[in-house]
Image: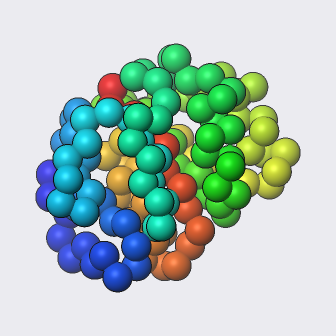
Amino acid sequence: MRFAEADGADGYLIQGYEPGAIRIAGQTYREGLIVTPRRLVPGWGPVAAAQLTPADVEALLDFAPQVILLGTGERQVFPAATLLTAAHKRRIGIEVMDTGAACRTYNILVGEGRDVVAGLMMM
């Protein structure tokens, strides 16, 4: 799926998503990644949401965002509540959704100037 009206002036924006692939800044990624308006970190996280670890969540928290978007692949899969506790203790919002929805939401929040980090899984 291609996203219309993506304007890179706000930082990294997601240009397109389809199951197994995310396009950012003209490059296609086929592995989990972290994206913020100013940083792109390929090779992040587990292949599937069931394999999410505290270290994966800490990698997102290290950016100290206002909100974390956790894209769990083709379907929304809620991780164990204990994995989200660290974000709640730091008063950082964490939203869990399928990766397509996380990509769309990420672009909207970046366009609003929000301090957001997305952890995006492919499966």
Residue, far top: 51
Residue, far right: 89
Q: Position of residue 19 (x, y in %)?
A: 22, 35
Left or right side of 53 for 117: left
Residue, far bottom: 9
Regarding residue 71, the answer to whether it shows in the image is no
**Number of numbered markers:** 0
Left or right side of 26 for 54: right
Q: Who's the residue at 28% across and 78% down the image?
A: 7
Q: Position of residue 35 (x, y in %)?
A: 44, 54
Q: Nearer the viewer, residue 99 or 43?
A: 43
- Name the quarter where the C terminus is drawn: top left
Question: What is the image's colouring?
Answer: rainbow
Residue 5 location, quadrant: bottom left
Q: Position of residue 23 (x, y in %)?
A: 22, 52
Q: Relative to 87, is 74 above or below?
A: above
Q: Nearer the viewer, residue 15 or 27?
A: 27
Residue 55 location, quadrant: top right
Regarding residue 56, the answer to whether it shows in the image is yes
Q: Who's the residue at 22% across and 40% down the image?
A: 21
Q: Relative to 56, is 99 above or below?
A: below
Q: Position of residue 87 (x, y in %)?
A: 74, 44
Q: Who's the residue at 47% across and 60% down the image?
A: 39
Left or right side of 62 for 50: left
Q: Who's the residue at 59% across and 68% down the image?
A: 115
